[in-house]
Image (cartoon, helix red, strand yellow):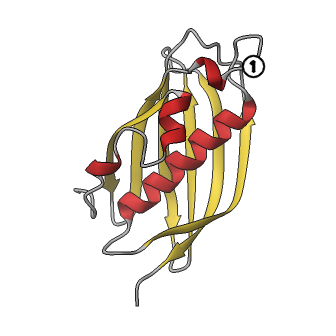
Amino acid sequence: MESRRDMDRWLGDGGMAIIGVLGGRFSAYGVDGEDLGWVQGEFAPAELACNPHGTVQAGVHTVLLDAAMNFAINAALAGKDRTSATIEISTELIRAAPREATYALRGEVVRLARQVAFAEATITSASGELVSRATGTFLVHREA
C-alpha cells in the first residue's frame, strides 16, 4: 500500500536540523496494511553525537529513535492529522555504537488509535545486530 501522505519534503533530516547535525538521515517511508506506517534511514554518527570515548551518547539514540517513531506515525496519518506530543518513550541501549560505523535506523507504527499511537524504532549495525531500540506512545491530533 502506498503512503497516505506525501512526506518526501521531510526526507533527510525529517524537518529537524538536529537530526542531520547528529548524522541521521531518513531515506524511505510507507504504509503497510491499513495504518502501519514505517520509515527507514541511516545514522553515520557525527563527532557531536559522541562522548569523549568515541561512542554515541545515550540521549542521541533517544533523539533519533523518537524522531523515527514520529515520522512513521505521521506517514500513516491522512490529511492534516499529525502527532502533537510524545507521551512516553522507553529506550534501551543494547551495545556501544562507535563513531566509525554506519547504522540503519527504522521506525514502525505498532497501533494507531483515535487519540494515541504506539510505535517502536531500532538502530542496527551494518551486520544486523541490534544496537538500540525504543518504544513510545504519542498523542495524535486529528482535524475535525
Residue 49: x and y in percent read 64, 25
Q: Which residue extends farthest bottom?
A: 144
Q: Quadrant of the N terminus?
A: bottom left
Which residue, given by chain and number where applicable, does mark 1 sit on?
51
Relative image position of residue 119 (x, y in whole percent)? 56, 55
Q: Where in the figure is residue 100, as x and y percent of width and height?
A: 56, 8
Task: Residue lying at the far right in this picture: please name it.
Answer: 52
Q: Secondary structure at mark 1?
A: loop
The image quadrant that residue 40 belongs to is top left
Return the x and y of residue 12 as percentages of the image width and height: 37, 38
Q: Residue at x 48, y 47 (%)?
A: 16
Up the image or down, 79 lies above or below 53; here it is below
Residue positioned 54% across, 12% down in the render: 101
**Amino acid type indicated by mark 1:** Asn
- The one of 32 and 96 positioned closer to us in this rendering: 96
Q: Residue at x 56, y 31 (%)?
A: 123
Query: Which quadrant is the C terminus positioned in?
Result: bottom left
Q: Is residue 21 above or below residue 115?
A: above
Side (left or right) of 124 relative to 133: left
Quadrant of the image occupied by residue 136: bottom right
Q: Quick one: which residue is furthest to the left in this view?
A: 2
